[in-house]
Amino acid sequence: MPNSDPRSSALPSIRGSSALFLDFDGTLAELAPTPDAVRTAPGLLDSLATLSGSLGGALAIVSGRSLADLDRLLAPMRPAVAAEHGAVLRLADGRMHFAEPPDLRDALHAGSELARAHPAVVLERKTMSVALHFRGAPQLAQACIDALAATIENRPELELLHGKCLVEVRRAGVDKGRAIAALMASVPFAGRQAIFAGDDVTDEAGFAYVQDSGGVAIKVGDGHTIARHACESPEALRGWLASAASTASTASGTSAAAAAGPAR
Ligand SMILES: [Mg+2]
């Protein structure tokens, strides 16, 4: 129903004054049956490196994944990162910020028991959270949710997060909106216009922050969203990034040639 969708399918241009924030899974990379099976597409790192250079380093990955996981998927790049939804932040200059780690022993115990009983369920222990992935066993969604929900009763410092085929216990008050705000307060992001692309319900807090602060939100794929821009797939988003990277390298080639003076 293209005519009833209020979102714009024309993606914004990435300007020299933009700050680019990108979710990883489902946004830059296609989802896979398990997190470990997700791959970085050929050419993506070249696009990201070129864009990061043209934005003075104002490009960050904003993901629910752990920092170690993101560094593995993005190597040899080491961009600014909000990992674990922002509980772990690496600024553009490499400085780290960590939220205080919550006590997750109950969630770890309950999650391990369920994953042991059902091998298609994948338990993931991150620094600041415990997640159950059930893409390989969608019929166990409610069992996964119930198991982790029981561990946060009377624990106001914890909350349950629902993602795509995923439920996670984490510290309350950590979300991608706060993560992007923290990065936007640091060099070289401060003073730029934020663009954030994401695909999941966990990205909505990031969309709200960037749109409220005059930036641009892009929802990748289907689903209810507050984002005012739409992109149909990770492949299409990568195409947009590749095209912006190509424009940026042409522009820098042109300005380098101009700076060098006329050819002799
Ligand atoms: Mg995602």
Image (cartoon, grey):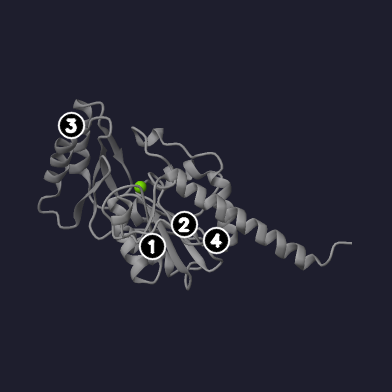
Residue 139, numbered label: 3
Residue 6 falls in image quadrant: bottom left
Pick the front one: 11 or 55: 11
Q: Secondary structure at mark 4?
A: loop
Image-based side of 46 in relation to 229, left or right: right
Residue found at x 39% / y 66%? 182
Would you name the residue on which mark 4 appears? 57
Residue 9 falls in image quadrant: bottom left
Image-based side of 40 in relation to 142, left or right: right
x, y percent for residue 91: 47, 60
Can you see residue 162?
A: yes
Tell me which label, 1 or 2, sits earlier in the chain: 2
User: In the rendered view, would you say 16 is above or below 96?
Assistant: below
Would you name the residue on which mark 2 appears? 60
Image-based side of 145 in relation to 128, left or right: left
Would you name the residue on which mark 1 appears? 180
For the residues marked 1 and 2, what is the alpha-carbon distance in whole angstroms? 9 Å
Q: Secondary structure at mark 1?
A: helix
Contact? badges 4 and 1 (CB < 8 Å)? no
Contact? badges 1 and 2 (CB < 8 Å)? yes
